[in-house]
Amino acid sequence: ASGGASITVRDILTASQRQPVPQRGYQCMSCCRVFPTLWSLKIHIQHSSQEGYSCKVYYRRLKALWEKEHKEREAAAPKA
């Protein structure tokens, strides 16, 4: 796992697309809080440990798992 992996807006959007939110906003997939903007969610993730949450750890681990899956799919794909 890449412990220092940076969480991008694309990572947040990919995660949030898997869980529909009944209200307007973006839901943190770790703590389930809903934020009005993508920017506010990203700030929350970056500073989650100061708020008593481990959201940054969750997103880093999720990103590492996605990268591992992507590499495994590329390795399994038939070479042309």
Image: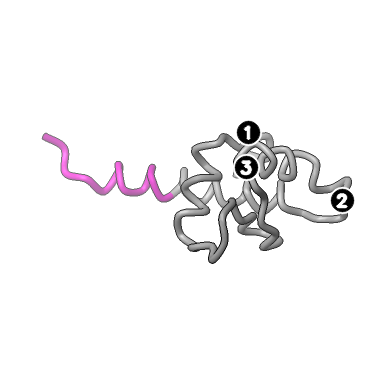
Q: Earlier in the sequence, mark 3 or mark 1?
A: 1
> Is 53 left or right of 9, judged from the image as shown?
right
Residue at position x 54%, y 66% from top?
22
Residue at horizontal 61 percent and vertical 58 percent from the top: 29
Task: Residue under label 1, please give it.
Answer: 6
x and y, in percent, of residue 23 in the image: 57, 61
Dots 1, 2 in contact, CB < 8 A: no
Distance between the Cα atoms at labels 3 and 1? 19 Å
In-image side of 44 versus 36 (left or right): right
Type of residue at label 2? Glu
User: Mark 3 — residue?
Assistant: 37
Q: Which residue corresponds to the image point at 60% horizontal and 41% vertical from the top-left?
A: 38
Q: Which residues are magenta?
A: 69-80
Q: Which residue is at the far left?
A: 80
Foreground: disc 1 or disc 2: 2
Outermost residue to the front? 24
How many marks do you count on the picture? 3
Quarter of the image for residue 4 reads: top right
Q: Earlier in the sequence, mark 2 or mark 3?
A: 3
* Identity, as a three-letter code, of the amino acid under mark 1: Ser
Bin the neighbour count of mark 2 within 10 Å (Cα to Cα): few under 14, some 14-19, many 20 and up.
few
Say if 44 sits above or below 6 in the image.
Answer: below
> In x, y percent, where is residue 44?
74, 44
Residue designated by label 2: 51
What kind of element bears circle 1? Answer: loop
In magenta segment, residue 67? no
Whether 8 is drawn above or below 17: the answer is above
Name the image quarter holding residue 52. Answer: bottom right
Q: N-terminal of the two: label 1 or label 2? A: 1
Q: How is the image coloured?
A: one colour
Between 80 and 62, the residue placed more toward the observer is 62
| Amino acid type assigned to the residue bearing label 3 in the image | Thr
